[in-house]
Structures are given as C-alpha cells and as structure tokens.
Image (cartoon, helix red, strand yellow):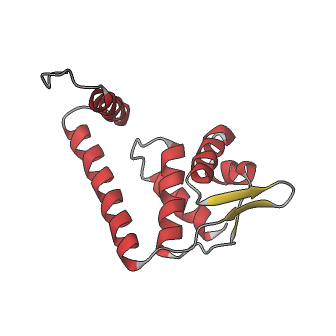
Amino acid sequence: MEPITQRLAARLAEGTGVPVAHLIVEDIWLAVVEGSLGSGERLPTTRQLAIALGVSPRSVGRAYAELERRGVIATRRGEGTFVSLAPSSEAEQTRHREFAALCREAVERAERLGFSVDDLLDALAEFRTANREPSSPDGIR
C-alpha cells in the first residue's frame, strides 16, 4: 500500500464523521503542502484508491475533481493522475496547517454542541449566502 493510501486509511479509521471526499482532499492537499507528495508524483487511480480504502469510487472521484479544480493535481488521459502543484513556502505550509486545525476544531465544537458535520456545512453555506446578499441603502439586509 502506498504511503498516501496508508495515511488516508488511518484517517478514515478514526471515524471522525467527516465526508470521505473531504478527507481525501484535505489529506492529499496537506501531503503536497508538507512536501511528502512531490510535484509530478503519480497518484493511485480512482478505482485503486477506492478499493484500497474500502470506499465508493464516486467519493474518490469527487475528491480528485476538487483537487483538480484547485490545481493540486492533473489527470492526463491514458497516463494517470499526478501532483501538479509545487510545494509551498514554509509560511504557506504553516497557514494551511493552521487552517486544517481550525476546521477540525470547528467540527469538534459543533459535535460537542450536538451538531453534525453536515449541520456545520449547512450553517456555513447559509452564512456565505447571507454575506453575499446586497445590503439595502440603509445598511439592513
């Protein structure tokens, strides 16, 4: 089993309740930022990773699509999926580690309050929508 697959399997075994696709995105992103996955390194196929982790290929596909959208990986038809992002500076690595810790803390606090990760995501989506609505002339939404 490849190191990235082992790392992901360990994260999934923790049973955090975080959606599989999100865990895959977060873990691969952190591996690239930390430098344990180098630019040009080949990733397992969607099917290979799904089988190794015992998850749906659809979840892995969603994760890979999001990573591709972010410019972290690139899929070359007939060749495979590769890391396409060079490692970040130390400051950027620290920033991403702190952001990941903030996300984990938010999930843990929500769970202590009796809310699920989905509840938290719904609340964040509502918050984003509310902050995008234009204000009226008197400043009231």
Image quadrant containing the C terminus: top left
Image quadrant containing the N terminus: bottom right
Residue lying at 23% horizontally and 32% vertically, measured from the top left: 114
The residue lying toward the viewer, choosing from 26 and 77, is 77
Q: Position of residue 103 (x, y in %)?
A: 32, 51
Q: Position of residue 94 (x, y in %)?
A: 34, 71
Q: Tell which residue pokes out farthest to the left in this image.
A: 138
Q: Tell which residue pokes out farthest to the bottom in this image.
A: 90
Q: Is residue 70 above or below residue 33?
A: above
The residue lying toward the viewer, choosing from 58 and 78, is 78
Residue lying at 40% horizontally and 41% vertically, measured from the top left: 17
Count of marks placed on residues: 0
Q: Is residue 58 above or below residue 102?
A: above
The residue lying toward the viewer, choosing from 74 and 121, is 74
Q: Position of residue 35 (x, y in %)?
A: 52, 76
Q: Quadrant of residue 137?
A: top left
